Amino acid sequence: MKEDSLETIELELAILIRRVTSTSSRIGNLDRSAYLLLHHIATKGAAGVKALAGEFRLDISTISRQAAALEQKGYLSRIPDETDGRAYSLQITEQGLKELKEDKQTRMKRVGEVTRTWTDEERQTFGMFLKKYNQSVFKE
C-alpha cells in the first residue's frame, strides 16, 4: 500500500473520531457505551459480564459499572446462573428494547441526514469498508 494512502486513512480517521466524539457522543438518549451494550445483548442474547468484557475489550469492572447503570434504569436485568450461585447473565428488558429501538431510529436518522447526498451504492460501500476496518482492528 502506498504511504499516501495510509496517510489519508490515518488523517481521515483522526478527523472522524474527533468530529464524532465532539458532536454526537449523545445522539439519542443513550450514550455510546450503553447503546453498544444494549445492542449486543439484544442481538446476541443474554451474556455474562466476563464475556461482554472480552467482546468489547474492556475491564470487567468497566462493563459491570455500565451494566449496573443500565440495570438501575430498568434496561437490563440479571439472570442467575443455575450452576454457580454467584454468577449471572444480563438480559435486555422490554423497556431496554424500547429505548434501544428509539435510539437506533434517532441514530439512523442522523446518518441519513449526513449521507443524504450519497447514492445507495456509496452508502453500501462506505458501510462495507467501515465494517471491514472495524473487524480488522478487532483481530489485532
Image (tube, rainbow, N blue to C red):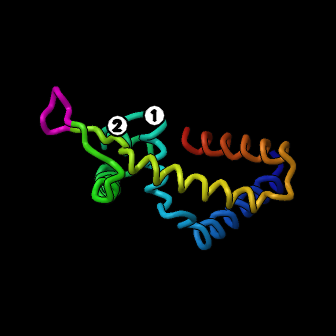
x 23%, y 38%: residue: 88
The residue pinned by badge 1 equals 44
**Measured from the top left, where is residue 73 in percent x and y?**
32, 59
Disc 1 crowd rating (10 Å Cα; few below 14, some 14-19, many 20+) is: few
Q: Which residues are magenta?
A: 80-87
Q: Residue furthest left?
A: 85
Q: Secondary structure at mark 2?
A: strand
Residue 47, label in figure: 2
Amino acid under disc 1: Lys
Quick one: quadrant of the C terminus? top right
Whether 81 is among the magenta residues is: yes
The Cα atoms of the two marked residues, 2 and 1, are separated by 8 Å
In contact (CB < 8 Å): disc 2 and disc 1: yes
Drawn side of residue 62 relative to residue 117, left or right = left
Quick one: quadrant of the N terminus? top right
x 53%, y 67%: residue: 26
Q: Is residue 105 above or below residue 79?
A: below
Q: Is residue 54 above or below residue 71?
A: above
x 28%, y 38%: residue: 89
Disc 2 crowd rating (10 Å Cα; few below 14, some 14-19, many 20+) is: some
**Measured from the top left, where is residue 126 in percent x and y?**
76, 47
Amino acid under disc 2: Ala
Q: Secondary structure at mark 1?
A: helix
Q: Residue furthest bottom?
A: 22
Drawn side of residue 42 relative to residue 9, left or right = left
